[in-house]
Image: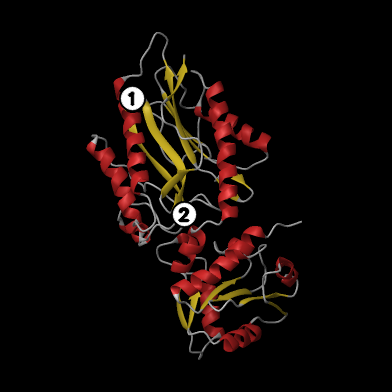
Amino acid sequence: MVDFTIQLEKIQQAVGILKEKNVDCWLTFVRETAHNSDPALPLISPSNVTWHTALIITSKGDKIAIAGRYEVGNFERMGVWDEVISYDQSIQPALVEVLDRLNPKQIALNYSESDTAADGLSHGMFLTLQRYLAGKPYEFISAEGILSSLRGRKTAGEVARIRAAIDLTDQVIGRIGEVLEPGMGGLQMANFVLGEYEKAGVPPAWDIKYCPTVTVGPDSPVGHLSPTDQYIAKPGDLIHMDQGVILNEYISDIQRVWYLQPKGETTIPEAVQKGFDTVRAAIMAAAAVLKPGVQGWVVDDAARQTVINAGYPEYKHATGHQIGRTVHDGAVLLGPRWERYGNTPYGIVEAGNCYTLELGVPVPGHGFIGLEEDVLVTENGVEWLGNVQTELYVIPA
């Protein structure tokens, strides 16, 4: 039996958001979504679709699905759509009739210059919509603001699924520390993690070619790269991993770091300890200001300045992104005011948002120290969603 719980929660939530933002109507217009899906579709649809499909939600509470003959049953089974309308030759007559009846002033469409998760309407489908509705008085506007809140304000059901994914990932992380040792290559480490995912019956949270990513020692590159056995762990190296899983359609995203302590060494080298303490302090600085009502860039700035003030180079990415159905779940970004991020760092954090807090620093001669924690924004601040790394994980050689 297909579970529509999340979609039911999000559709009801959408009505309230439309009222709040004073937008008459939200239209998700798609076709052949196996080829070119709309990121908003899984929030409100039970499946991919093939023929032209229009999903219409209004601020008055209307919920109307128009779909091809062979797919209307999927929407009827959900039990949430007030009307499910079937067509054969063309969706245009039914779409025009419904919109004429609803008579919205504004129609919010899924396009955005800044938020990839709100930019699902293809140019071809937009042109089709223009042709279908030629001469009609409707004003098309971006649904970016609606989708930012809809994706960002996680329901209780969504938070529960994210927690479960994080808990499973924490269990895998605990087992990694039991097998790490000098002589292991980065690919060998990654294959161990993937084996643990396979035992649990879950896929990685992003492309299996680089989930997990593994950084071994001082020469291994950092980033979204495939792991390799070119870099072999040796005593004194830092091992850094970025990983996550998909469980019940929701993800985790966590970074951890281990130190391979040489024989006879009784204390952690000062440079390594300073690096860890700086990363930890920067994450805590971000957490201290992360609360409803703050702009995303303010959170980023708190962490970024902590790193810079400690004498490390500025990291070249955002401090945090939202997580949910995807590892980069769109909406407000905890990022710097750089052009490539568009308007997303200027957005307002809301209660119910689930974020990563992530950053790292290089430690010459040892490797990279990077941490990533997953948090839930509450009315009063943040709630840590999993086990938090508060000290360096030391593996005696």
Question: What amino acid type should be assigned to the residue bearing mark 2?
Answer: Asn
**Tally of numbered discs:** 2
| Residue identified by numbered label 2 | 353
As drawn, the residue found furthest toward the top would be 264
Q: Residue at x 44, y 39 (%)?
A: 372
Q: Is residue 161 visible?
A: yes
The x and y percentages for residue 394 are 44, 21
Please determine whether, in this image, residue 226 is positioned above or below residue 299: above
Q: Residue at x 51, y 25 (%)?
A: 185
342 left or right, relative to 179: left
* Residue 179, numbered label: none
Q: Is residue 245 visible?
A: no
Task: Specify few, some or many for label 1: CA neighbours under 10 Å numbering under 14, 14-19, or 20 or more.
Answer: some
Image-quadrant location for residue 156: bottom right
Closer to viewer: mark 2 or mark 1: 2
Task: Specify few, some or many for label 2: CA neighbours under 10 Å numbering under 14, 14-19, or 20 or more.
Answer: many
Between residue 19 and residue 94, name the one nearer to us: 19
The x and y percentages for residue 287 are 37, 44
Please determine whether, in this image, residue 311 is positioned above or below residue 159: above
Distance between the alpha carbons at the discs numbered 2 and 1: 32 Å
* Residue 273, numbered label: 1
Q: Residue at x 30, y 24 (%)?
A: 271
The x and y percentages for residue 100 are 58, 89
**What element does badge 1 sit on?**
helix
Question: What amino acid type should be assigned to the residue bearing mark 1?
Answer: Gln
Q: Residue at x 51, y 19 (%)?
A: 181
Please determine whether, in this image, residue 93 is positioned above or below residue 47: below
The x and y percentages for residue 53 are 64, 73
**What element does badge 2 sit on?**
loop
Looking at marks 2 and 1 on the same chain, the residue that comes earlier in the sequence is marked by 1
Please determine whether, in this image, residue 324 is positioned above or below residue 128: above
